[in-house]
Amino acid sequence: MRCDEVALLLPEAVDGNQPVPLLVQRHIESCLRCQAELARYRRMLRSLQLLRTQFLEPAPGLLTATLAAIEEAGERRAIRSLLSSRRLAYAGAIGGALAAAGATATALLVHRARRRGALAH
Ligand SMILES: [Zn+2]
């Protein structure tokens, strides 16, 4: 039996679900190259099994730290956008509109008061 033929059967040999043909077993026992290959397959399978059963446990406090970092980043961004000139212009426009509305209201009140005063006379 040749090594490349055995190599094709190695995954099954590692899996252990199917009995390895005696010819293959004999070749592996006598061939260092195929033994090394088999060992490599076994290692790979073991790490795959580890990956399957390993769960990443978040370290205690990680959630709090993450939330704090997000909050901090959000605040920083809010401050930065408040400081940006466009936002300031926008705020100024709102302020101006409010001032205009206030002025209009004042003018209306004055106008009404004057009219009332005129009627009283
Ligand atoms: Zn071999």
Image: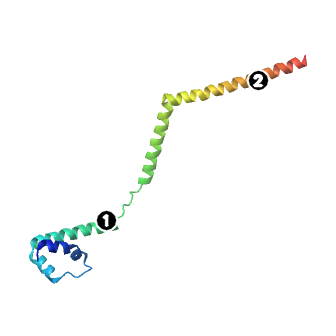
Ligand 1 position by quadrant: bottom left
**Residue 50: x and y, percent?**
30, 67
Q: Nearer the viewer, residue 80 or 22?
A: 22
Residue corresponding to mark 1:
51
Q: Residue at x 26, y 66 (%)?
A: 47
Dot 1 alpha-carbon crowd within 10 angstroms: few under 14, some 14 to 19, many 20 or more = few
Q: Amino acid at mark 1?
A: Leu
- Horizontal relation, residue 42 to residue 23: left or right: right
Q: How is the image coloured?
A: rainbow
**Residue 91: x and y, percent?**
57, 29
- Which of marks 2 and 1 precedes in the sequence? 1
Callout 2: SS: helix
Res. 14 mark: none
Q: Nearer the viewer, residue 26 or 67?
A: 26
> On screen, 71 above or below 36?
above
Residue corresponding to mark 2:
108
Asked if disc 1 and disc 2 are in contact, CB closer than 8 Å, the reply is no
Disc 1 residue: CB within 8 Å of ligand 1:
no
Callout 1: SS: helix
Dot 2 alpha-carbon crowd within 10 angstroms: few under 14, some 14 to 19, many 20 or more = few
Q: Nearer the viewer, residue 11 or 117?
A: 11
